[in-house]
Amino acid sequence: MQLQLVDIKSYRIAPQYLSLYRLLYCLCIMVFVGLPSYTWLSSDLNIFFNPPPYSIANIFNGFPPALFFKILTLLNIIFFGLMFLGIYCRWTSIAFAITAIIGHNYCYSFGKIDHLLIWLIAPIFLSLAGWGNHFTIGSSKDKQNTTVNQQDNSIYIIMLAMTIAFSMFTSGVQKVLGGWQSWEAEAVRYHLIKKYYSLGSLDLLADYFMSIKNHLVWKFFDYSGLMLELGFIFSIMRRKWFQVFLVGGTIFHILVLLMFNIPFYSNIIVYLVFINWDDIFKRFNYNFITKSINGIKIANYILVAGSCIILYWLYWFFTAGSIFIIPGVIDITDQKMLQSTSKTAMRLLFLSSFIVLVFCVTIAAFNRFKTKRINY
């Protein structure tokens, strides 16, 4: 038996599971993350233009005019809506990712970048893997003309895994260059103290961590973070190894949230695609769905509810002015944002549409899987 260095085949995910994940991905973006907005950028900020060496923004000598970023934001919203509904899903997914990547290149042209790009890159790989083959509105062109081998889409899944692993690895390399491996250094504690006194109390458990003086505890945080990020690049050789590191990454993000009050919702959403879908659905009982549900035209409800959500975002785009992000459900329900009658009405429409959408998507998904189980 020949031992493979990288077990690519183990990364295969059935297109129907990926399609269900597409709906889950979009719902999570609507709830936790929101869509990026680039309307705050314009050529007026050229004095601060300082893009990284390897950036699309480096092609130009400064920021384009404000109209460019308004159009870019509008296109990004539209492509997200089409991707969610499954309309020309492969192409709209790629277009959504490209518009977001272009916009973020300019957002990162002030000399600083962050780690929240994975969720914007993921649709490129997953659309090629077949996440637009099921749960779509009307007939899907992707389903009819797909070139994805239904038995093997593993190459695209492992490419996404490599992207995640490489981003973690480069972050680990920067920590090594910064001296995190030195026994005398307490790098995590240094960053905590710096943020604590520059931003004030960070809420959550920051006060508790500030009270910890034990050097061994802080070196445990330093070394475990280094080993996790550097080890990611080697874990992709086996899917099970990679899943273990994703669990470690999730714990890492939770600790960052508790310690620094920095959420990484978007990264965890992407990690979710690597769960064992087959095992979950083999153990799931579909019999609770009554026969009466089968008569409901779920697609119509999904279309209406989904359209209301996208229309709300378009309304926000045209009325909110220059903003950094188009908010998700959590932000919308914040009391500070419910300030006027008209806006409150629009947000209630958004929330009610979202509830209907979640219900319809859930019923449609389980009905589809129930039918497949009966056919098998």
Image (tube, rainbow, N blue to C red):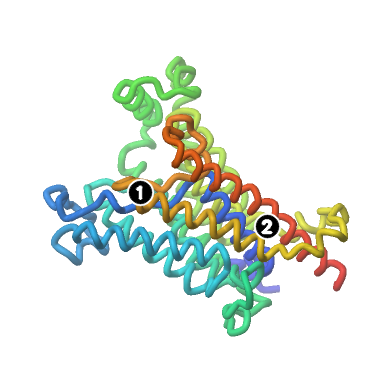
**Vertical side of 185 occupied by 253: above or below:** below
**Vertical side of 333 occupied by 84: above or below:** below
**Vertical side of 188 occupied by 69: above or below:** below
Q: Quadrant of residue 102?
A: bottom left
Q: Which residue is mark 1?
A: 319
Q: x, y (%) of residue 28?
A: 56, 49
Q: Could you give the CA–CA distance between mark 2 and mark 1, rounded to whole angstroms?
A: 29 Å
Q: Secondary structure at mark 1?
A: helix
**What is the three-letter code of the residue carrying label 1?**
Thr
Quick one: 241 or 136, which is closer to the camera? 136
**What is the three-letter code of the residue carrying label 2?**
Val
Q: Please name the residue shown 63% across and 64% down the image.
A: 18
Drawn side of residue 182 relative to residue 289, left or right? left
Instruction: Single out the mark in the foreground, 2 or 1.
Output: 1
Quick one: 105 or 134, which is closer to the camera? 134
Drawn side of residue 292 relative to residue 23, left or right? right
Q: Which residue is mark 2?
A: 361
Quick one: 293 or 108, which is closer to the camera? 293
Q: Is residue 165 visible?
A: no
Drawn side of residue 259 relative to residue 268, left or right? left
**Vertical side of 138 occupied by 173: above or below:** above
Q: Secondary structure at mark 2?
A: helix
Judge the density around disc 2: few (<14), some (14-19), many (≥20) Cα neighbours within 10 Å. many
**Image quadrant in which the C terminus is located:** bottom right
Disc 2 to disc 1: CB gap under 8 Å: no
